[in-house]
Image (cartoon, helix red, strand yellow):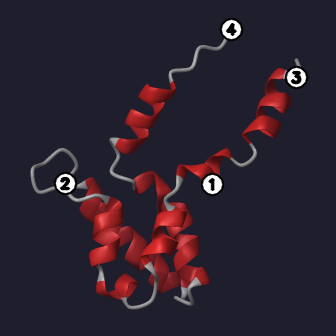
């Protein structure tokens, strides 16, 4: 039997300030026309700025740091960043995955 605590899972993900979405953000930046190497630097810089301040009074989320970054603000719409940071992206194939792992029952 698998017991799942969705609220706790969401809280764990949120406690990381959004850094867990860095891969999708990297792809969004490249789709927006930013060179991959530049996109990687942007993501890395903002992820580390988020990570090093987690839990501190002046902490900002990964999203806040990205939107304040001039290299992002000049090239990518806020909606694109929001879409890349949506947890729905990771739920698209969840039923298929569960069927593969647990069977059709």
Residue named by callout 3: 103
Earlier in the chain: of badge 2 and badge 4, it is 4
Gap between marks 2 and 4 measured at Cα: 38 Å
**Quick one: quadrant of the N terminus?**
top right
For the C terminus, give its image quadrant. Answer: top right
The mark lying in front, picked from 4 and 1, is 1
Where residue 49 sits: x, y (%)? 25, 64
The residue under the point 45% across, 81% down is 77
Q: Which-is-in-front pick, marks 1 and 3?
A: 1
Is the C-beta separation of discs 4 and 1 under 8 Å? no
Residue 51 place in picture, x, y as percent = 28, 54
**Callout 2 secondary element:** loop
3D distance between C-alphas at marks 1 and 3: 23 Å
**Residue 82, above or below 9:** below
Comparing marks 2 and 4, which lies closer to the viewer?
Answer: 4
Front of the two marks 2 and 1: 1
Mark toward the viewer: 2 or 3: 3
Q: What residue occupies the far right of the structure in this picture?
A: 104
Secondary element under disc 1, as helix, strand or loop, is helix
Residue 1 circle label:
4
Residue 32 location, quadrant: bottom right
- Distance from label 4 to label 3 (Cα)? 13 Å
Q: Which residue is mark 2?
A: 53
Q: Residues within 10 Å of mark 2 (few under 14, many from 20)?
A: some
- Mark 4 closeness class: few <14, some 14–19, many ≥20 residues within 10 Å: few
Q: Earlier in the sequence, mark 4 or mark 3?
A: 4
**On the rendered structure, is 91 left or right of 23?**
right
Mark positioned earlier in the residue sequence (1 or 3)? 1
Left or right: 68 in relation to 103: left
Say if mark 4 contacts mark 3, CB within 8 Å: no
């Amino acid at each position: 039997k698998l017991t799942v605590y969705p609220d706790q899972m969401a809280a764990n993900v949120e406690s990381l300030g959004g850094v867990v979405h860095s891969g999708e953000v990297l792809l969004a930046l490249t789709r927006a026309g930013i060179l991959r190497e530049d996109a990687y630097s942007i993501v890395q810089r903002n992820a580390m700025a988020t990570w090093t301040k987690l839990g501190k009074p002046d902490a900002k989320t990964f999203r806040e740091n990205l939107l304040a970054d001039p290299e992002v603000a000049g090239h990518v719409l806020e909606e694109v960043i929001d879409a890349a940071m949506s947890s729905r992206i990771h739920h698209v194939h969840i039923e298929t995955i569960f069927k593969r792992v647990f069977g059709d029952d």
